[in-house]
Amino acid sequence: MSAHTEVETPQLLHLVIGGELRHLDAPVFRDLSQVEFVGAYPNYEEAKKAWKARAQATVDNAHMRFFILHAHKMIDPRGDH
């Protein structure tokens, strides 16, 4: 392997979304048109950083919740790719 060869790490797509919930006991958004797409990330670690930053920024609103979606599992549920 040459010094210029990069080892490609597998992409495990994760999405971070969030918004205000109707109630604290269920993940049901108050208004789907207001759900925030924080971003798409190549792995769980990067998604967790974004999730944590956004969750901390909205800590004053107890009904705000952000979630990490394991999109790679939805795209390829059998894990073939």
Image: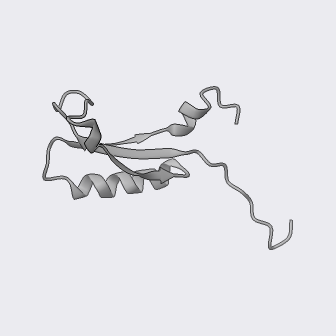
Left or right of 23? Residue 15 is right
Instruction: Name the residue at 41% across, 51% down.
Output: 48
Point out residue 25 in the picture as x, y percentages from the top left corner. Answer: 19, 28
Judge left or right: residue 34 versus residue 37: left
Nearest the viewer among 14 and 29 is 29
* Most distant residue in the bottom direction: 3
Quarter occupied by residue 65 = top left
Query: Could you tell me how many numbered marks the image carries?
Result: 0
Residue at image location 24% in from the left, 56% down from the top: 56
- In the displayed structure, would residue 2 be above or below residue 44? below
Q: Can you give x and y, in whole percent of width and height, for residue 47 in the image?
A: 45, 51
The furthest residue to the right: 1
Model colouring? one colour
The percent coordinates of residue 53 (x first, y second) are: 32, 58
Q: Nearer the viewer, residue 1 or 51?
A: 51
Question: Residue at coordinates 16% horizontally, 30% vertically from top-left?
Answer: 23
Residue 30 figure quarter: top left
Determine the residue located farthest toward the front in the rendered image: 33
Quadrant position of residue 26: top left
Image quadrant occupied by the C terminus: top right
Residue appearing at x 58%, y 45% in the figure: 12
Q: Tell me the quadrant of the picture where the N terminus can be found.
A: bottom right
Nearer to us in this view, 56 or 22: 22
Residue 70 placement (x, y as % from top left): 49, 38
Q: Is residue 38 left or right of residue 33?
A: right
- Left or right, 4 with respect to 25, comes to right
